[in-house]
Amino acid sequence: MSSQTDVFPVKGMDAVVFAVGNAKQAAHYYSTAFGMRLVAYAGPENGERETASYVLESGGARFVFTSVIKETSERGKFLNRHVAEHGDGVIDLAIEVPDARHAYEHAVAHGATGLVEPHELTDEHGTVVLAAIATYGETRHTLVDRSRYTGPYLPGFVAREPIVAAPEKRFFQAIDHCVGNVELGKMNEWVAFYNKVMGFTNMKEFVGDDIATEYSALMSKVVADGTRKVKFPLNEPAIAKKKSQIDEYLEFYGGPGVQHIALATNDIVATVRAMRAAGVQFLDTPDSYYDTLGEWVGETRVPLDELRELKILADRDEDGYLLQIFTKPVQDRPTVFFEMIERHGSMGFGKGNFKALFQAIEREQELRGNL
């Protein structure tokens, strides 16, 4: 789809914004364990009395961590309640757009709930135009036009030195996709929302036996903008013998929300080795998975023995192949986790690995007593 005919043009993901209990500690964790670089900060030292926010980047991927210092407004009340009810989690999947006013007006005209009307923020680095619409649960999409801005993040933020020395090689360079979990029977409703409100089209659909184990199942559809820069898989639980990973998430998160964020890497082997050394825990994959992997995936950049050693999954489709691995949840609640993905032609999401992945998650669920 060309930008001339795209009803809701986007430039890409702007930021993933988290509400957390302790933003300073979260910033340290993602600096050390994920190799990210602190680039900007807003807090009491520069006039923001209510919250502290840390902005971290790795290539084109940007995370923002915000926590409340002293609740004084509706925003502070929302953030405190969100953390109390949901634990640390994603509150905003911000999207960079060429025209935030047009994007907001189009979205609201096509059924979106407007949360923040278009407005400008200005400082010595220029002007940013922001607006926001609601999506599933308490998640929002802030629409960001930063074409006239050269500052480190947004007006109100100041540049900050990294917390730790940057790794020799960054662990990942972009956000590949962001996955949302919604309630039973709501997936198609939210797919239709993205189709109608944002002009996103459907990329993939996974149902039934594609992603079922003996105990649990889910349904999944993927929506994306016309350029495929922004991709949002949406999951809902399916009826099964026991509690699925989606049911578990919805129970512990207290409703719909962002389940995981996939991060694109050029060297998944180096990334996994570095993240493991920094203490990140990944889901385990049994050796039996690798016994037949070569038969259907064929040759990949990484030898089979190394995939087996590092527990990296592989999948192939008509366009190429991909390598992927999933972390365990990164907070005490079994909610948000991450995926590292290295693509070689494939634009898929690891359909061939769904069963192995779910079985790995079920083993963790059983250890938690939640299966």
Image (cartoon, rainbow, N blue to C red):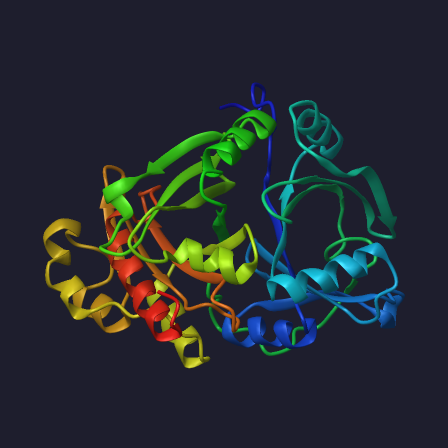
Q: Residue at image x 56%, y 31%?
A: 193
Q: Can you give x and y, in whole percent of width and height, for residue 362 in the image?
A: 31, 64
- Taking the image as shown, residue 9 lies to the left or right of residue 364, namely right
User: Vertical placement of 156 versus 25: above or below?
Assistant: above
Query: Toward the viewer: 18 or 308?
Result: 18
- The answer to whether residue 123 is seen in the rendering is yes
User: Vertical placement of 323 versus 307: above or below?
Assistant: above
- Taking the image as shown, residue 17 lies to the left or right of residue 36, namely right
Q: Quadrant of residue 359?
A: bottom left
Q: Quadrant of residue 254?
A: bottom right
Query: Toward the viewer: 72 or 103?
Result: 72
Exactly how many numbered labels are in the figure?
Answer: 0
Query: Toward the viewer: 7 or 138?
Result: 138
Q: Can you give x and y, in whole percent of width and height, for residue 333 in the image?
A: 51, 69
Q: Can you give x and y, in whole percent of width and height, for residue 242 in the image?
A: 32, 57
Q: Which image quadrant: the C terminus? A: bottom left
Q: Residue at image x 55%, y 60%?
A: 253
- The answer to whether residue 173 is seen in the rendering is no
Query: Toward the viewer: 323 or 125?
Result: 323
Q: Residue at image x 54%, y 76%?
A: 32
Residue found at the very far front of the displayed protein: 241
- Taking the image as shown, residue 37 lies to the left or right of residue 192, namely right
Q: Can you give x and y, in whole percent of width and height, for residue 287 in the image?
A: 17, 69
